[in-house]
């Protein structure tokens, strides 16, 4: 069995995971840790495979997912790790995933760092993954064949994810909000108060953008005064196209 565990707020990580699953061609169980109902304890044997796909937040995997890794139990289980990032860099995300999963009984046999539209600044890497990106992911999946051996991944072995404290940008709603509460139920960290859904608790919000994507009235957006300048600056610094990388 292939266990496809991912966290995807804006859908790009999920698209890459789906492409992998199709090409890998094994029976699959999928879990999106964005949803609290899909955060379940899983025990995998050495005959199973784990596909672990995460968006990169500040060079690491989302803090909420670091904690959830304790739900995964391997028994010398092969694992494929995928870091999906918004065209800046994936920094220590792969080495962090590899280290955390090794401690839970997994052997990381293949890794990928792939580019997607930036979920906070969507004018960077707009429209990625493209069909070409997904094709590369399918070829990667097809090329993973036994006998498996542990793979090396880039990153600082002394990584410290506590250095990332989140971004200053948090979505809020305007008068288009109809109090349907879709945002409340889709927020992975409970940052939107059902009694006042236009506001966002910035101490809980991880800026994942699930509420922006799922709001049926397009009421939720980044509205901070500094956002436009930050977006332009980010575009200048990180607008140049980056290519996907695969490690086997
Ligand atoms: C809080 C936050 C931090 C991010 N940090 C990075 C980063 O360090 N490097 C990068 O290239 N992209 C970064 N991104 C962009 C995401 O990695 C990228 O948009 C990813 O595709 C989001 O996955 P999703 O569509 O499955 O939600 C960040 C996004 C968010 C929300």
Image (cartoon, rainbow, N blue to C red):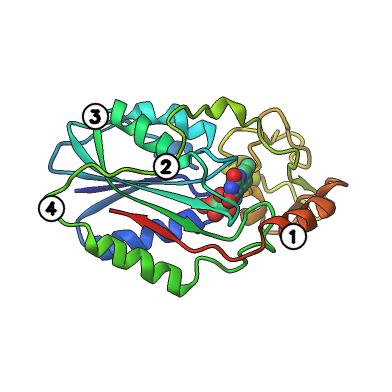
Q: Is mark 4 within 8 Å of ligand 1?
A: no
Who comes first in sequence, dot 1 or dot 2?
2
Labels 1 and 2 touching (C-beta < 8 A):
no
Where is residue 3 drawn, in percent x and y?
Answer: 27, 46
Q: Residue tagged by mark 1? A: 236
Given residues 171 and 152, the one toward you in this image is 152
Labels 1 and 3 touching (C-beta < 8 A):
no
Q: Secondary structure at mark 3?
A: loop
- Residue at the extreme right: 225
- Up the image or down, 148 lies above or below 157; here it is below
Between the residue at mark 1 and the residue at mark 3, the CA separation in whole angstroms equals 42 Å
Labels 3 and 2 touching (C-beta < 8 A):
no
Between the residue at mark 4 and the residue at mark 2, the CA separation in whole angstroms equals 22 Å
Who comes first in sequence, dot 1 or dot 3?
3
Query: From the viewer's perspective, is the residue at label 4 or at label 1 nearer?
Result: 1
Labels 4 and 3 touching (C-beta < 8 A):
no
Q: Residue tagged by mark 4? A: 146
Where is residue 215 drawn, in percent x and y?
Answer: 66, 54
Q: Secondary structure at mark 1?
A: helix
Relative to residue 218, is residue 92 drawn left or right? left
Between the residue at mark 4 and the residue at mark 3, the CA separation in whole angstroms equals 18 Å
- Residue at the extreme bottom: 131
Q: Residue tagged by mark 2? A: 94
Q: Is mark 3 within 8 Å of ligand 1?
A: no
Q: Secondary structure at mark 2?
A: helix
């Amino acid at each position: 069995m292939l266990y496809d565990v991912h966290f995807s707020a804006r859908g790009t990580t999920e698209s890459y995971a789906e492409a992998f699953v199709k090409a890998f061609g094994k029976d699959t169980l999928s879990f999106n840790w964005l949803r609290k109902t899909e955060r379940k304890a899983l025990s995998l044997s050495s005959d199973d495979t784990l596909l672990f796909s995460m968006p990169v937040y500040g060079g690491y995997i989302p803090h909420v997912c670091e904690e959830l890794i304790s739900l995964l139990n391997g028994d010398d289980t092969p694992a494929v790790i995928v870091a999906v990032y918004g065209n800046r860099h994936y920094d220590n995300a792969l080495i962090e995933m590899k280290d955390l999963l090794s401690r839970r009984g997994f052997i990381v046999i293949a890794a990928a760092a792939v580019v997607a539209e930036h979920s906070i600044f969507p004018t960077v890497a707009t429209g990625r993954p493209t069909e070409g990106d997904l094709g590369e992911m399918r070829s990667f999946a097809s090329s993973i064949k036994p006998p498996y051996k542990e793979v090396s991944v880039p990153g600082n072995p002394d990584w410290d994810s506590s250095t990332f404290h989140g971004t200053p940008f948090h979505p809020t709603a305007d008068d288009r909000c109809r109090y349907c509460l879709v945002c409340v139920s889709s927020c992975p960290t409970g940052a939107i108060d059902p009694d006042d859904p236009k506001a966002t608790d910035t101490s809980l919000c991880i800026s994942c953008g699930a509420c922006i994507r799922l709001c049926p009235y397009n009421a939720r957006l980044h509205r901070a005064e500094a956002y436009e300048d930050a977006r332009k600056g980010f575009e200048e610094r990180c607008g140049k196209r980056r290519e996907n990388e695969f490690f086997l």
